[in-house]
């Protein structure tokens, strides 16, 4: 695998209101392929694909 970004679709509740959300995690690129913008391209694809359908985006970084 060269680059990866995973998503989980979920419903979150904030202030008593439900929102459709995407949780993004496991964003990584193999060391031999870094600094080529691959993870950025994956994130851009995720945002473009889901921004109209979901209300929230959650990202987890280590």
Image (spheres, helix red, strand yellow):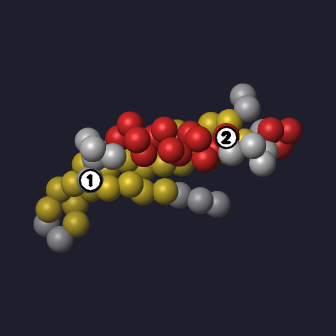
The residue located at (22%, 60%) in the rendering is 13
Q: Which mark is residue 55?
A: 1
Q: Which mark is residue 12?
A: none
Asked which secondary structure carries label 2, the reply is: helix
Left or right: residue 34 versus residue 40 is right
Residue 22 locus on image (x, y percent): 37, 47
**Residue at the left extreme of this rendering:** 16
Q: How many labels sit on residues?
A: 2
Identify the mark nearer the N-term, 2 or 1: 2
Residue 14 locus on image (x, y percent): 22, 66
**Pointer 2: residues within 10 angstroms few (<14), some, or many (20+)?**
some
**Residue at the top extreme of this rendering:** 1
Asked which secondary structure carries label 1, the reply is: loop
Residue 39 locus on image (x, y percent): 63, 44
* Nearest-to-viewer mark from 2 and 1: 2
Q: Is residue 5 visible?
A: no
Task: Work out how far the residue at label 2 is from the one at label 1, CA to CA, in angstroms.
Answer: 25 Å
Q: Is residue 17 visible?
A: yes
| Residue located beneath label 2 in the image | 38
**Pointer 1: residues within 10 angstroms few (<14), some, or many (20+)?**
some
Of residues 32 and 45, which is closer to you in this image?
A: 45
Of residues 27 and 49, which is closer to you in this image?
A: 49
Left or right: residue 18 versus residue 56 is left
The residue located at (72%, 28%) in the rendering is 1
Of residues 39 and 5, which is closer to you in this image?
A: 39
Q: Quadrant of residue 61?
A: bottom right
The residue located at (48%, 48%) in the rendering is 24
Residue 19 locus on image (x, y percent): 22, 54
**Above or below, 28 relative to 3:** below
Quadrant placement of the C terminus: bottom right
């Amino acid at each position: 695998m060269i680059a990866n970004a995973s998503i989980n679709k979920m419903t979150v509740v904030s202030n008593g209101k439900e929102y459709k959300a995407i949780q993004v995690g496991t964003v990584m690129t193999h060391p031999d392929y870094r600094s080529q913008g691959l993870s950025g391209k994956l994130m851009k694809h995720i945002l473009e694909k889901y921004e109209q359908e979901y209300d929230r985006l959650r990202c987890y970084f280590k």
